Each structure stands twice: as C-alpha cells, then as structure tokens.
C-alpha cells in the first residue's frame, strides 16, 4: 500500500499500522527508512525479517526533538552542542541508552543511535504516531539504500505493510554517525551529509576514525566493507578512465564529450547534487551493466560520504 505524503488521512492510517505493530517505509532527508515502533520488540523484529538483516546490527531510533531524545538516551554536552548546530538534520548520535530501549533495537549494546530527521512529512508522521521509530534504510541488507518510494516498492513492496511516498530524498546518502558515549573520544562511525570538519569545529576536537581503534571489529556493523553494494562490479578511478566495451563510466561532473555508456553525478561539480544522484544512478546502471567505473569525488564535505559508499560498493 503506497500512501501519499500530502494526505493527512493517509499519514493517520500509516500511524495506525505502526501502533498496531506493523512496519512502514518512510521518507527522510537522507534515504527512505523502514520504520517500526521502537518500544515494541515484536514490531522491530519484523524489520530485521523484511530486510534479511542480522540481529547483531543495531538500529537508529528517530525522534522529533531533544526532549524525546532524553527519554531514550543519556545525552551529554557534546550531543547538546551538535544538536544546536545541526538538528533537525542528517546526523545521528550514539549515546548511552535508557532501559526503555529494547535489546533488539540496540543489538544488546549499552548504547543507542538516535537521530532527529528534518524531512517535513517524516516529522508530521512522527508527531501523529507519537512513538520513537526505529528505522534502518529500507533496502534488503547489504544493497544500496533507496532514495525514492519506487526503489522501496521494487525491493521490499511485498514484505512490508505500507510505504509513505514523500518524493525523492534531498541528501541521497545516509546520515553522518558520531559516537559520543565516551565524550573524550568522539568517533566518526559513518561519514554523511554533515561534514567531518564542521562537527570538529563545533566540538573543538578531532574525530577519531574507528579503524584506528580496532580494524578487525568495526564499531558500526554498517562499516562492514561490502555494505551498500550493487550487484555489478564497481571499479573506482581518480582523474582518468579508459572506456571499456559493455561497461559504464560514472563521472563526478558532465564530461566535455560524453560517449555511449558515460554518465555523471552532477552537471557542474556540485558534491551535494552528486550525493543526491548516487544511489539512484547505481541502481539503474545495475540493471543494464555488469561493470561500472566510478570516479572518486574530492574527499571533503559530503564528498567523503560519497567516496565511502563508492569504496564499499567496489569492495567485493
Ligand atoms: O540516514 C540514515 O541514518 C538512515 C535513515 C533511514 O534515517 N538510516 C540508516 O540506518 O542508514 P541503517 O540501519 O541502514 O544504518 C545505521 C547504522 C548501522 O551501520 C548500524 O550498525 C549503526 O548505524 N548503529 C546503530 N546503532 C548503533 C550503536 N548503538 N552503536 C554503533 N553503531 C550503531
Ligand atoms: Mg543501511
């Protein structure tokens, strides 16, 4: 069942599904999520089953504001500062959890990931539902995240109770995740739309890279190397890439003389536009090419997040 974002009555019906223990795909400014009432373990279990996601991989809980965050997690000064600077928006905080969060949400960890999305429909929906929503990206485990309702429908349509169509996602890559449970060692678990440098400016500290801590045991299972993969073989390049019969080339920006099989993420070297188009383009090329060459972006701002997803797609 696909619900329209513009109909309040549709949002109410979708909220009833959530309160009855169902699962609903929801639009956010980053990617589409697959939501359930975070306080209902049986409902949360359905998310794992629909995605084929291992139970060791914890979920992000979505709330409207800081007051609600305080009901499920233990915020600290760093969380308060980042909240003031970037929320609502595409950033997730990992904090010590409160007992009301079921183990299935946090995968038995003492921490919980929390985020406050800015997407208008999602905010209206959260207000109507009135419960915290645990929501991973709405894709089968390991595949690229969906950025339109049609992407969700194509892969999970028969496994979920409803989809709220809120148009295509503005950021196009998943939220930035910062681990703040140990304030003296803030860690960037996943680069995203809120850039590393801006977070460091607000905290007045460098963010630690989880690989420095322990490369064999990633702190966020989403940091597994082969996450976010299309089926096609993805090969990365820097400045130059020879065309190859039957393979696609994806450039950062429109090439001067595009050839057959050439595609680009941005018309005019805009990393935000590139991020917005990344997953949709990979999805559509995945249907018609077995090999996709992808150009890395300059590794700054949201470019770091795009490069991160590209290297994971290439790791197979
Ligand atoms: O933009 C987003 O964050 C989207 C939208 C739907 O909000 N959600 C999303 O969720 O990307 P998901 O489940 O695909 O990625 C969440 C990542 C996973 O890699 C998970 O391992 C990590 O967050 N995570 C969740 N809870 C954690 C925790 N307590 N400690 C460390 N990592 C955690
Ligand atoms: Mg995901």
Image (tube, rainbow, N blue to C red):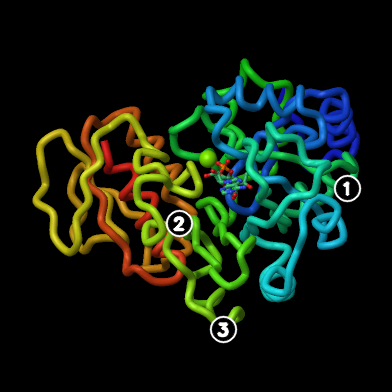
Q: Residue at (28%, 32%) from the top-left corner?
A: 232
* Number of residue marks: 3
Relative placement, left or right, of 243 versus 12 is left
**Of the numbered discs in the image, which one, if any, rests on residue 293?**
none
**Of the numbered discs in the image, which one, if any, rests on residue 204?**
3
The crowding category of the residue bearing disc 3, from other C-alpha atoms within 10 Å (few below 14, some 14 to 19, many at least 20), is few
Q: Is residue 52 above or below residue 200?
A: above
Q: Residue at (55%, 59%) from the top-left corner?
A: 176
Report the front residue among 165 and 194.
194
Q: Residue at (70%, 34%) from the top-left corner?
A: 103
Of callouts 2 and 1, which one flags the residue occurring earlier in the amino acid sequence? 1
- The location of residue 104, given as percent across then percent down, is 68, 31
Pointer 2: what residue? 275
- The location of residue 56, given as percent across then percent down, is 55, 33
Pointer 1: what residue? 127
Q: What secondary structure is found at the residue carrying circle 1?
A: helix
Of all residues shown, which one is farthest toward the top?
A: 158
Badge 2 vs badge 3, beta-carbon distance below 8 Å: no
Report the front residue among 103 and 177.
103
Q: Quadrant of the C terminus?
A: top left
Badge 3 vs badge 1, beta-carbon distance below 8 Å: no
Q: Mark 2 vs mark 1: give the one in front.
A: 1
Q: Residue at (59%, 34%) from the top-left corner?
A: 138
Residue 42 appears in the rendering:
yes
């Amino acid at each position: 069942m696909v619900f329209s974002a513009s109909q309040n009555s549709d949002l109410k019906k979708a909220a009833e599904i959530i309160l009855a223990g169902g699962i609903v795909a929801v639009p956010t400014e980053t990617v589409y999520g697959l939501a359930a009432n975070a306080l209902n373990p049986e409902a949360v279990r359905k998310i794992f089953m629909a995605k084929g996601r291992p139970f060791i991989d914890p979920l992000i809980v979505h709330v409207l504001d800081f007051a609600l965050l305080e009901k499920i997690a233990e915020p600290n000064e760093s969380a308060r500062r980042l909240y003031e600077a970037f929320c609502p928006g595409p950033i997730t905080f990992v904090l010590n959890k409160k007992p009301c969060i079921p183990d299935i949400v946090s995968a038995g960890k003492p921490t919980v990931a929390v985020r406050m999305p800015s997407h208008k429909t999602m905010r209206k929906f959260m207000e109507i539902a009135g419960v915290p929503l645990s929501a991973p990206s709405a894709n089968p485990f390991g595949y690229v995240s969906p950025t339109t309702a049609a992407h969700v429908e194509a892969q999970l349509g028969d496994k979920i109770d409803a989809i709220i169509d809120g148009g295509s996602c503005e950021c196009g890559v998943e939220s930035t995740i910062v681990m703040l449970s140990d304030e003296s060692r803030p860690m960037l678990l996943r680069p995203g739309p809120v850039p590393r440098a801006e977070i460091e400016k607000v905290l007045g500290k460098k963010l630690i890279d989880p690989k420095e801590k322990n490369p064999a045991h990633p702190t966020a299972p989403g940091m597994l190397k082969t996450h976010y993969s299309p089926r096609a073989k993805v090969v990365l390049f820097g400045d130059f890439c020879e065309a190859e019969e039957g393979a696609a080339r994806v450039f950062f920006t429109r090439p001067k003389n595009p050839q057959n099989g050439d595609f680009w993420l941005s018309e005019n070297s805009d990393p935000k536009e590139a991020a917005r188009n990344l997953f949709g383009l990979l999805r559509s090329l995945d249907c018609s090419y077995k090999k996709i060459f992808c150009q890395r972006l300059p590794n700054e701002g949201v470019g770091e997040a795009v490069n991160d997803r590209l290297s994971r797609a290439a790791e197979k």
